[in-house]
Amino acid sequence: YSGNVFVNNTFGELLNFQSGKEYLKVKVTYYYADADQGDNAIFVLALNGNDIHQMEMTNALSDHTPPVLYLIIPPLTELIITGKNATDSDTRTIGVVLTGRVYG
């Protein structure tokens, strides 16, 4: 869980970790915490330095169901999720939740 992270129009880090010796089966849920704002947010997920997923969402008022990505993360893999305000330079609050299971 990233918590609420303040970002503007440059990418800010939401999560950054390396998986252990087991593989992970996870659900990635992106969210936009500023429900009253009209800006869009962009999220980028990278594994071992390679962007594998990018998603743009509108503010929380129009996204009733948060976008979800299902992913299998191999052992000893670096995962970084970043996000930014896609619409302008104002600061907005976004985040990501990673839930799942470890398989050995």
Image (spheres, rainbow, N blue to C red):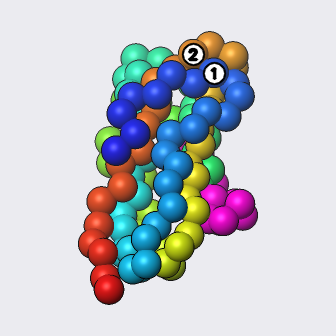
Magenta stretch holds residue 6: no
Could you tell me residue 50's position as x and y percent? 72, 64
Q: For mark 1, what is the residue?
A: 8
Q: Classify residue 88 as left or right of residue 34.
A: right
Q: Are marks 2 and 1 in contact (CB under 8 Å)?
A: yes
Q: Residues within 10 Å of mark 2 (few under 14, many from 20)?
A: some
Quarter that holds the N terminus: top left
Q: Classify residue 62 as left or right of residue 81.
A: left
Looking at the image, which is closer to me, 76 or 94?
76
- N-terminal label among 2 and 1: 1
**In the figure, 28 relative to 85: above or below?**
below
Residue furthest to the front? 21
Q: For mark 2, what is the residue?
A: 91
Q: Classify residue 10 as left or right of residue 59.
A: right
Quarter that holds the C terminus: bottom left
Q: Classify residue 31 as left or right of residue 39.
A: left
Q: Which residues are magenta?
A: 46-57
Could you tell me residue 82's position as x and y percent? 59, 43
The residue under label 2 is which amino acid type? Answer: Thr
Label 1: which secondary element: loop
At horizontal 36% and vertical 33% (from top left) the residue drawn is 3
Q: Quadrant of residue 33?
A: top left
At horizontal 43% and vertical 71% (from top left) the residue drawn is 20
Task: Point out which mark residue 69 bears.
Answer: none
The residue under label 1 is which amino acid type? Answer: Asn
**In the figure, 74 relative to 52: above or below?**
below
Could you tell me residue 76's position as x and y percent? 53, 73
| Residue 9 shows in the view | yes
Q: CA distance from mark 2 to mark 1?
A: 4 Å
Looking at the image, which is closer to me, 27 or 32?
27
At horizontal 61% and vertical 33% (from top left) the residue drawn is 12
At horizontal 41% and vertical 22% (from top left) the residue drawn is 34
